[in-house]
Amino acid sequence: MRKLLILPFMTVLLSIGTSCSSDEENTNQSDTELAKESAAIEVAESFDFDLVLDVEDLNFSRDFTEEDSISKNGCVVVTTQTTNGGFPKTYTLDFGTGCTSPRGITRTGIIEITLTDMLRNPGAVATVERRNYTINGRGLSGLVTYTNTSTSTSIQWNRNVSNGSFTSLNGSVFNFNSDVDTRLIQGAGTLIRTDDVVELFMGNRTVSRPNGSSLTITISQPLLKPYTCANITQGVLDFNGTVLQGSLDYGSGACDNQAVYTTVNGNTINITL
C-alpha cells in the first residue's frame, strides 16, 4: 500500500533473519531501510503524478477540485508561463514553508511542471523539476519526465526519473533512478479525478546509498492505485538486494493497509503497512 507510515512492515522485515555478526546485522538493517525508503519514494512520486494531472484543470479555466492534490485553501501560489497563450506551458507551484492539501499531503518549496500538450494526448511530455522541495517531511529532487505513450485502446505514460535524490525523515540520503510504465484503466471518459484508477504495469526502481549498497524493486504483477485510496490495492513487487530478497503482495483489490511478504525460502508474513 502506498502509505508513508510503513514502519510496522519494516519492523517485521528486520525480524525475518538473524545474523551471526554485527556487520551482517548492519547490512540487514541497511537493506530494510532501503526497502522502506524506496516505498516512500513511490508514495511521493505517486502524489506528484496526481499533481501533474491536476494542473490540467487550469487548461479548462477551472479551479482545482477539493479532492485534488492542490487545495483551494490558498497556501500555494501558482504562476503560469505560456507561449502566445498555448503550449508549451510551465506551471510554477510555490508551497512556501508549508501547504497541506485536503488529502493530508504537506509540501514545502517549489515544483515546476512543463507541459508540451495536454498530458492525456498521445506524444505529450511533462517534465517536473523541484527546488528545495519536500513532501510529508521528506526531501525529493531529480528530473522526472512523463511521456504519453498511449495506444488506440489505452491511455498510458512512461515515467522516467534520473538523478533522483531522497532524504528520509531521519536525514539519510538515498539516490535513485526509475523507469515505470503506467496506464489509466478507469476514469478515462470523464474530466473528474475521483473515478481514476491507475495501473503501474511494468518497470523497476534502483535505490542506493552513498556507501554503495543498493536494492532493486521490480513490478512482477501490475499494481493498482485508485485515486480515492491512499494505498496500492493490488499487485506484487519483487525485492532484490544484498540481504533482503522476496516479494510483496498487496492483495486482490481491497482498499486497506494489508499485504503479505514472502521470503525466497517460501515463508510468509502478514504485514501492516
Image (tube, grey):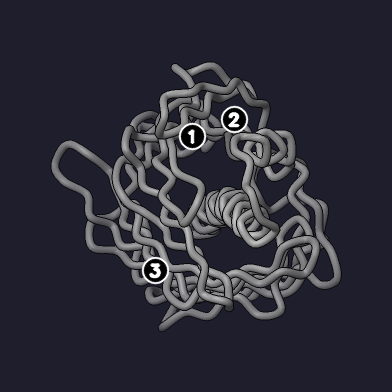
**Is 92 situated left or right of 120 in this image?**
right
Query: If you read the primary sequence from the N terminus, does the residue marked by circle 2 or circle 3 appear first?
Result: 3
Q: Is residue 5 above or below residue 234?
A: below
In the rendered image of this protein, does residue 132 appear above or below residue 58?
A: below
On screen, residue 248 versus residue 149, left or right, reads: right
Residue positioned 40% across, 34% down in the render: 264
Residue for point 41% across, 39% down:
237
Q: Report how far apart the C-alphas of labels 2 and 3 lie in the structure.
A: 24 Å
- Counting residues from the N terminus, which is met first, the one under dot 3 or under dot 1? 3
Q: Which residue is mark 3?
A: 145
The answer to whether residue 84 is seen in the rendering is: yes
Residue position for label 2 = 228
Position of the C terminus, as image quadrant, is top right
- Image location of residue 55, percent across then percent down: 54, 58
For the residue labelled by badge 2, is the local secondary structure a helix, a strand or a loop?
Answer: loop
| Badge 1 element | strand
Categorize mark 1 by other alpha carbons within 10 Å: few (<14), some (14-19), many (20+): many
- In the rendered view of the protein, which quadrant contains the N terminus? top right
Q: Nearer the viewer, residue 68 or 202?
A: 202
Tell me the kind of residue under disc 2. Thr
Check disc 3 and give the amino acid type.
Thr
Q: Residues within 10 Å of mark 2 (few under 14, many from 20)?
A: some
Residue that badge 1 annotates: 225
Which is more foreground, mark 2 or mark 1?
A: 1
C-alpha span from label 2 to label 1: 9 Å
187 vs 49, nearest the viewer: 49
Residue 80 in picture, x, y percent from top left: 58, 75
Q: Quadrant of residue 199?
A: top left
